[in-house]
Amino acid sequence: MSQRKYAIIGTGAIGGYYGARLQQAGFDVHFLGLSALLQASDPQLALFCICMSGACVGFVMHNRNPAKVFMGDTGSLALGGALAAVGVSTQQLFPLLIISGIFFAESLSVIAQVGYYKATKDENGVGKRLLKMSPLHHHLELSGWSEIQVVGVFYAIALFLSVLSIFLS
């Protein structure tokens, strides 16, 4: 019997913040490629990761704030699929979980918001909210953060999580 491994990446949750989504995916795929290169298991996979990372960085540099080209679900789901495929191929699912921390937090904020809203519905069908708006980046924006602040903090967190995953793997 073969053992099956699954990886689900919530890249679509970072909705309108295309710089954050792409840069996070760029960090993730770059560090997974670095991990594959360090393992010397599959240099072609490492090259694919570096090319994907370069494409993400190039798109972000070309499409600076304010964004003129929007990726949409098709692009974000493709990035998530590429991350999951590389994580499964390199057997690096735990480092993938670590470096995808922002995607995880964004997806979890949506799940928690919807679950809490449904659980606290009154007789009028109105529930309470955990956040001002989900996903998390919209909550931060409604709390007074600018888009540039949110993206900058997400970049810093993504870089930290990526470096941490290298040390832990």
Image: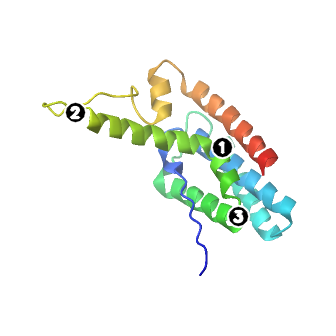
Q: Residue at x 39, y 25 (%)?
A: 132
Q: CA distance from mark 3 to mark 2?
A: 42 Å
Q: Determine whether 123 is above or below 99 in the image.
A: above
Local crowd size for mark 2, using a 10 Å CA cut-off: few (<14), some (14–19), many (≥20)? few
Q: Is residue 58 above or below residue 142?
A: below
The amino acid type of the residue labelled 1 equals Gln
Residue picked out by circle 1 = 23
15 or 123, which lies in front? 123
Which residue is more in the foreground, 1 or 114?
1
Q: Position of residue 33 (x, y in %)?
A: 77, 58
Residue 76 horizontal side relative to residue 62, left or right = left
Residue 28 seen in render? yes
| Label 1: how many Cα within 10 Å (few below 14, some 14–19, many 20+) | many
Locate residue 79, reporting x and y percent.
59, 56
> Dot 1: what SS?
helix
Q: What kind of residue is marked 2?
A: Lys
Give the CA separation, mark 2 to mark 1. Answer: 37 Å
Q: Nearer the viewer, mark 3 or mark 1?
A: 3
Q: Which residue is mark 2?
A: 121
- Hey, which residue is sitting farthest bottom in the picture? 1
User: Residue at image x 47%, y 53%?
Assistant: 73
Residue 91: which disc? 3
In the picture as drawn, the residue positioned furthest to the left comes out as 123
